[in-house]
């Protein structure tokens, strides 16, 4: 399990799926969410299997989230900032 850094100098407030979180500034959205215990970021298109951030360097696209109303953002490439609104992608209509 991922652990929060022992010493956080500055914190920012973000919202993930309606949950307010205080996270360390200067980290990516993916790292901040994993540190808070949110490992499943989306579901696979086929089979709805849980998916988590994988490469953490913008290559695999497993960490796509909606960030501040912008869909398909790579959470491992976006730094957290005060007031961010983050949502999992909406499931495809069946």
Image: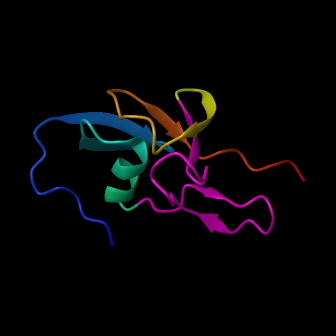
Q: Is residue 20 left or right of residue 76?
A: left
Quadrant in which residue 82 is drawn: top left
Front-most of 7 and 74?
A: 74
Eyeballing the image, is 78 above or below 92?
above
Q: Measured from the top left, where is residue 13 in percent x and y?
A: 30, 34
- The picture places residue 9, in percent across and down from the top left corner, at 10, 39
Residue drawn at 60 percent across, 53 percent down: 60
Q: Is residue 92 in the magenta section?
A: no
Tell me which colouring the rendered structure shows. rainbow
- 51 is within the stretch colored magenta: yes
- Which stretch did the figure color magenta? 38-67
The dominant secondary structure in magenta is: loop
Q: Is residue 54 left or right of residue 21?
A: right
Q: Quadrant of the N terminus?
A: bottom left
Q: Residue at x 79, y 69 (%)?
A: 47
Mark yes or no: residue 72 visible.
yes
- In x, y percent, where is residue 17? 51, 45
Residue 29: image quadrant is top left
Q: What x and y, as percent, mark residue 45?
A: 78, 58
């Amino acid at each position: 399990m991922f652990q929060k850094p022992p010493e956080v100098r500055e914190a920012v407030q973000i919202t993930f799926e309606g949950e307010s979180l205080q996270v360390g500034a200067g980290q990516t959205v993916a790292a901040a969410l994993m540190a808070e215990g949110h490992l499943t970021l989306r579901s696979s298109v086929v089979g709805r299997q849980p998916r988590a951030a994988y490469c953490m360097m913008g290559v695999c696209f497993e960490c796509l989230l909606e960030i501040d109303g912008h869909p398909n953002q790579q959470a491992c490439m976006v730094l957290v900032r005060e007031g961010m609104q983050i949502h999992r992608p909406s499931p495809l209509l069946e």
